Image (tube, rainbow, N blue to C red):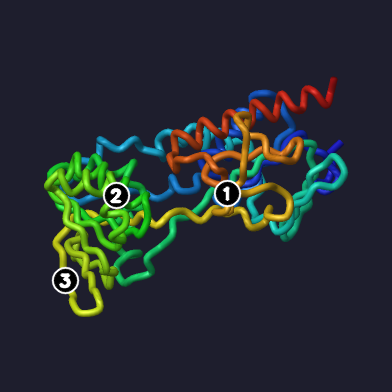
Amino acid sequence: MTTNSSEKEYDLLIIGGGPAGLTAAAYAVRKRLETMLIVEDLGGKTNYKFTLPDVETHLIIDGEELVSKFKSQIEYLDFARHTGSVTKFQRVGKHFIAKTSDRTFKSKAAIIATGGKPKRLKVPGEQEFFGRGVSYSTISHAPIFIDMDVAVIGDGVPALQAAAELALIARKVNVIGVPNKLVSSALGKKIKDSGKAEFFTGYAVKEIRGDASLETVVVRSRTDEKEIPVRGVFIELGYIPNTALFSRLVKMNHEGKIIIDENNQTNVPGLFAAGDATDVNAHQVVIAIGEGAKAALNAYTYLLTLKA
């Protein structure tokens, strides 16, 4: 007999359909768990491609390609998928309740895989050249820029780390916005000693310009304005996790990332988390895939103990 989703109890709810959520759903279905994936769009950040005119991008580990098989499997299993945005999520007794605008779902265990989004500069040209020279992931896209001029923008250690990585690959690295105290650090000195970096301390980005592809970044200080020729701009300001919905339920760090243990377990029994929404220290598709698989397998183990 068919039951309404508001009446049916699932083994596992998965919130979010990026690399972590898709992988978790695929593994959960393989384990024959009654699974429901609630998602706004399938694929998450892998839906955004990075291309650079006249430059081979074969050195990129393509996130879309890695996730495509999980995505196609979930697209086929429409009974395990609901398109919508979760507006309320809570634990009631030993169950988890997720509400969307039109449905209510109940489960014995749940996985939060809502991902995150990079902090933006919010300057002209940033959106226009996103994926066409503007990147928010040095780890993913640095290998494209061999012997090219690039810019790294940020005010913290991640920007300095990105500059160090790019100094091994690029012809010149223009580091914009990193304060003097970090430039004077051991890592900052190492980057300066490479002979490939120029620091623009006290400058902020005014605009990113180009035609068919990105060509320059315009920076300004209180007294000066410069136009720096670059092929790539790496924005390293950090990530904002999509976790506000769960702030009263799970423990988070100061950045709002969900704290998990080695089993992807949160502080709430039966509630797991995976991917960019967690305090795992890397925003990579391949890591999110692994974390999603781990979360699903550990949720399966948790559910076995409930049935025992």
* 82 relative position to 46: left or right: right
Nearest to the observer: residue 280 or residue 109: 280
Which label sits on residue 226? 3
Residue 102 position in % (x across, y down): 75, 58
Which label sits on residue 185? 2
Residue 281 position in % (x across, y down): 47, 40
Specify the quadrant of the image occupied by residue 142. Answer: top left
Q: Is residue 79 among the parts visible in the rendering?
A: no
Q: CA distance from mark 1 to mark 2?
A: 27 Å
Residue 121 position in % (x across, y down): 37, 65
Q: CA distance from mark 2 to mark 3?
A: 26 Å
Residue 217 position in % (x across, y down): 21, 65
Q: Is residue 7 among the parts visible in the rendering?
A: yes
Residue at the image position 26 percent from the left and 56 percent from the top: 233
Q: Identity of the amino acid at label 3? A: Lys
Specify the quadrant of the image occupied by residue 214. Answer: bottom left
User: Which residue corresponds to mark 1?
Assistant: 257
Residue at the image position 21 percent from the left and 70 percent from the top: 218
* 254 relative position to 230: left or right: right
* 260 relative position to 145: left or right: right
Mark 3 closeness class: few <14, some 14–19, many ≥20 residues within 10 Å: some
Determine whether the residue tagged by mark 1 lies in a helix, strand or loop: loop
